[in-house]
Image: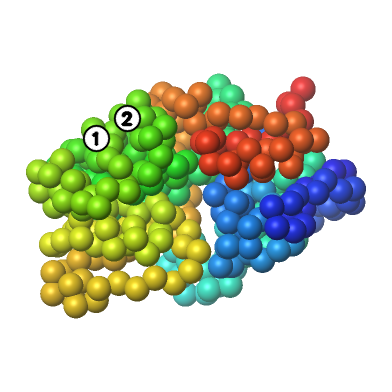
Amino acid sequence: MKQLIATAFKEVTLVEAETPSLKQGEVLAQTLVAGVCGSDLHAVQNLHPFVPLPYKPGHEVVGIIREVAPDVMGFKVGDRITVEPDLPCWNCKPCKNGNENLCENMQFFGCGYPQGGMSEFWTLSAKRLHLVPSDFSDEQASLIEPLSTPIHANKLAFLGNKDLSGKSVVILGCGTIGLLTLVAAKYFNAKKIVMTDLIEAKRARALRLGADAVLDAGSSTIVNDVRTELGESADVVFDCVALQPTVNQAVHMADKGGIVVIVGVPEKEVTIPLPIIQDHQIRIQGSATYLPADYKDSIALLASGALKIDEFVTAVFPMEKSQEAFDSALLGDQVKVLIRFSSAD
């Protein structure tokens, strides 16, 4: 089979590899499409804190089952599936408490794992698969995994409430995760949503997708600009950039009593103004991947039609042009780049 490997700085290589053998509890799947994630872009530039080069990418995966182990129930040959790529041990304290996304022995399919979804075939435990609704296109299904991340982040901001009703929300960054966070916050009934970004075209897309206001993140008065637009401090700030300047901005936008949710993958450590966080009772909340319930909400949101697929899936490359796909994603002017490995026919 053909398999993609991120081999060096900004380089991916399509190589010949042996098709994996099916084990107990697993399915053998053929990849239909795989998304190039922001985490992949960090990793291929040697910027990801947990995924060194070389690695086998592909965790935003839609596939079709070609073989099922005899002990697997609930799946059959021909089913379209998507992957929940975090691979917990199921034995540690977080796993036993239902927080398997925080597994103490976590492995991650497509991120430092022996297999990745950017290959023609792969095997994985059936426990990490979700059926794709029959009326979803492959492109629509490709957004289930990335949308689950901001859905999980939004839920962490509920603080015991059923949703974000009555809450003013700021989203820092109008890239893929920022825009998906916007869709999720709207789905969860946020009162008002303001977004910031350095790039005008990205701000324009956020406005088209339903942000109440967009502001230039490069403004020297961005914190006051946001608070003026909201008419108050932010109840929740989702930092989808996770750099020192955005963390600083987020804390001051949420001052006092607000929540800062870190959604973006940080390239390195940052500092925080701890005296202000303590004295002004600001909550700093990390958000790590997702849980099965987040996948269910993601599928429900996509089925509702609240997300405009064409605004998100902006480029699709064939497997043979995988390097071009990564190059295009690295330029930063796409939202979601997909690589097509096969069709369901």
Q: Residues within 10 Å of mark 2 (few under 14, many from 20)?
A: some
Quadrant position of residue 270 = bottom left
Labelled pair 1, 2 in contact (Cβ < 8 Å): yes
Q: Where is mark 1, residue-wise?
A: 213
Q: Where is mark 2, residue-wise?
A: 207
Residue 294: where, in percent of width, then height?
A: 43, 47
Position of 315 with respect to 15 (left or right) is: left
- Quarter of the N terminus within the rendering: top right
Residue visible at 27% across and 40% down in the picture: 215
Answer whether residue 125 is visible to the viewer in this image: no
Element class at badge 1:
strand
Tell me the kind of residue under disc 1: Ala
Tell me the kind of residue under disc 2: Leu
Residue visible at 61% across and 52% down in the picture: 40
Compared with 225, 281 (above or below) is below
Compared with 215, 78 (above or below) is above
Compared with 155, 138 (above or below) is above
Residue visible at 86% across and 48% down in the picture: 15
Position of 154 with respect to 99 (left or right) is: left
Chosen colour scheme: rainbow
Position of 173 with respect to 169 (left or right) is: right
Residue 237: where, in percent of width, then height?
A: 27, 53
- Quarter of the C terminus within the rendering: top right
Element class at badge 2:
helix
Q: Nearer the viewer, residue 237 or 59?
A: 237
